[in-house]
Image (cartoon, rainbow, N blue to C red):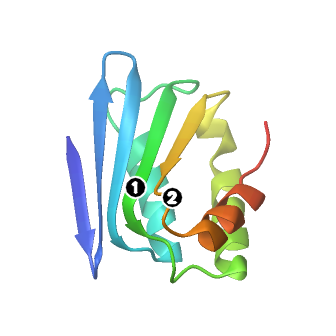
Amino acid sequence: MTNAKEASVEFSVQYHDGYFEVQTFGDAEVGKFRDILEALVTHEQWKPGTSFLLNHTALNKAPLTTDDMRDIVDHNAQYSGKVGKSKCAHLVARNNKQVNHRLCRWTPKV
């Protein structure tokens, strides 16, 4: 398991028999999404094409703006070669429909 802490954002990366789970906690910061992806693709068990679950149920997404979401999409695009044709599921809390809509709107369709 890999853990990282900085400011109020925390995340963990865990490998489970063929897939990864990334859990996020605290207040969202656009820069941490790059750190999360870097921790995932540099994990010793990572191979391009591995499926992963992004569990953001404990993440406060309210601080993210639409511009932040665009920046996250741009960061993710830079890792496309390392990620490969992975299947990814996003798990989010239902308590903030406006923020969840922004998240879905800026998640690239593959």
Residue in the foreground of this view, choosing between 24 and 62: 62
Q: 17 above or below 70?
A: above
Residue at coordinates 48% horizontally, 25% vertically from top-left?
A: 47
Q: 86 above or below 68?
A: above
- In what quadrant of the picture does the N terminus appear? top left
- In what quadrant of the picture does the C terminus appear? top right
Q: Tag 1's secondary structure?
A: strand
Q: Which residue is tagged 1?
A: 57
Q: Which residue is tagged 2?
A: 94
Question: Label 1 to label 2, Cα distance in Å?
Answer: 8 Å
Q: In the shown orientation, is residue 58 left or right of residue 106?
A: left
Q: In the shown orientation, is residue 53 left or right of residue 4?
A: right
Amino acid bearing label 2: Arg
The image quarter containing residue 86 is top right
Q: Residue furthest top?
A: 17
Q: Position of residue 40 (x, y in %)?
A: 41, 43
Q: Position of residue 57 (x, y in %)?
A: 40, 55
Q: In the shown orientation, is residue 36 left or right of residue 7?
A: right
The image quarter containing residue 21 is top left
Q: Position of residue 9 (x, y in %)?
A: 32, 72
Residue at coordinates 51% horizontally, 58% vertically from top-left?
A: 94
Number of the front mark, 1 or 2: 2
Q: Position of residue 2 (x, y in %)?
A: 23, 47
Q: 21 above or below 70?
A: above
Discs 1, 2 touching: Cβ within 8 Å: no
Amino acid bearing label 1: Thr
Residue at coordinates 49% horizontally, 72% vertically from top-left?
A: 61
Residue at coordinates 41% horizontally, 29% vertically from top-left?
A: 46
Q: Tag 2's secondary structure?
A: loop
